[in-house]
Each structure stands twice: as C-alpha cells, then as structure tokens.
Image (spheres, grey):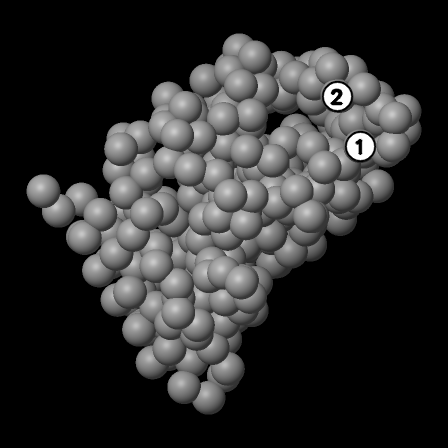
Amino acid sequence: MRYAVCSNDPAVIADSREAGFDYVEASVPSLVRPFDPEEAFEETLASYRSAGLPVESANLFLPRELRCTGPDAQPLDRLAEYAETVFRRLSRAGVPIVVFGSGGARSLPDGWPRERADEQFVALLSRIGPLAERRGVKIAVEPLARVECNYINTVDEGARLARAAGSPAVGVLADCYHWARNGETADTILAGGDVLLHAHLATLPNRKAPGIEPYDFVPFFRALAAAGYDGRVSVEGGLPPAEGRVAGLRAALGILRAARDEAVRV
C-alpha cells in the first residue's frame, strides 16, 4: 500500500516526506485552481512539485455552488465543462485519482426523490467518466457519514452508482471514518470491491490522524484486504501540531503499517 496525508500546506508536505509517507493528497481548489487562468495553475503546480512528494490524489471535486442533484442542479454541459478543466489539469500534474465527495454539491433538499437524485448523479458520472478516462484520471465517489450528507452514505451504495455510469474511470472510495460512523460492516466494502479505487482514514470519534487518540484500524484494513484492495490510503483528519509533527506523523505511519500487517496475517 501507499500512504499519504491530505494537505495543501507546504510545511506539512515537507514533514510528511520526512516522516516516510509516499505521496500527498491535495485539494482540487488549491492544486487545480479550476476557475483561474492557466498561468496561475502552472505556478501552483510548480510549488507543489518543489515540496518533494508526488501528488497522487485530489479531493473536493465539485464546489458547493456547482450543485449536481436536486431542483437547482447545474446543467450537465456546465458541469462537464468544469470537469474537463479539472481532469486536464490533473493529468498535467500527473494526478491519477480525484475524490468525488462534495457533500455540499450533492446533498438533497427536503422532498427531493432519491430515485431522481440517482438519475441526476448517474447522468453526470456517465457524462464525465469518458472525459476523465481520456485524461488518464479516475473518479472515486466518496460515501459520507449520514450526519454530514444525506445522499450516498455507504460504500455499496456508491459502488452501485459508479457501476451504473458504465465507465472504467468511475469507481468508489472507502473512508474508514465515514464507514465506521455510519456503522457499516466489512460487507459494504466487499460489495464495492470490484470498483474500489481509493481509501481514506481517520480515527473515531474526533477524526484525527492515527496515534492522536486510540482507534483500531485493523477491521478496516481487513475489509480492504478481503475486497482485494492494495492501493493508496490517505490520512484525512487532524494532524499533530507543528512542534513534533514529524515524529507524530512517523508514529502514525507505523500504526497504519502495523494494522495492515495484522489484517493480512494468515
């Protein structure tokens, strides 16, 4: 497996590199700058590259104002135009995975039928999947905790919608924090194993990096292993303070590797 910290902070990226992490997960707004001119993106890209860790995934795909479900959903042409800019710039940056969480853009207003939301969401994925594929980018739909978003909450639900898009560039993400907070079991990850593209994790209850509070990651890694997943895992949670951060991140990485080893031990 390859491990990362989610951050746009050059100091955190440098500390993550020193601690032994393999890559960094940036955000689409910070790295891609999709509403800014090409020159601004190139300048930002140069800054990330100088930090010393490759960017291999990016989150926060859709901003809140580009709604994709409900009565105020943006036209598909508008969303596809935005997505093409993101995918083109991610390809330029060498980033193969974009995380489609974006709870603010996909949450459902009261009374909006879930079946209609599914139609809207699958129509979007079907439209942008081929755009991503042409750029060598894959879209990982991220299920979110029910207390944070009321649409697409479990890994198997995300996998069902990803499959319906009919594109090899569309899959699902398993996030340990959301998965555990929803009370899911290994079965939901197993059900999405054929389209599982990426993973996030953090502790419960306070969504921190490993080691900041007690949490057993073995069940999550065991479910990933049972689903045949051995790819990227990004820490998406509160990090140790600047003073002692390298040591804290090094300890976090050790916790993750030990949990993974225990999960796959025969």
Identify the image quadrant of residue 4.
Answer: bottom left
Residue placed under numbered mark 1 in the picture: 108
Residue placed under numbered mark 2 in the picture: 114
Give the CA distance from mark 2 to mark 1. Answer: 8 Å
Residue 199 percent coordinates (x, y):
43, 43
What residue is shown at x 46% (from left), y 88% (from top)? Answer: 243
Q: What SS does tag 1 mark?
A: loop
Tag 2 and tag 1, C-beta contact below 8 Å: yes
Residue 253 percent coordinates (x, y):
31, 65
What residue is shown at x 34% (from left), y 80% (from top)? Answer: 247
What residue is shown at x 66% (from left), y 42% (from top)? Answer: 146
For the residue marked with disc 2, what is the amino acid? Arg
For the residue marked with disc 1, what is the amino acid? Leu
Q: What SS does tag 2 mark?
A: helix
Rendered view: 14 above or below 107? below
Residue 224 percent coordinates (x, y):
32, 38
Q: Is residue 38 visible?
A: no
Left or right: 31 in relation to 15 = right
Q: Quadrant of the C terminus?
A: top left
Left or right: 164 in relation to 196 = right
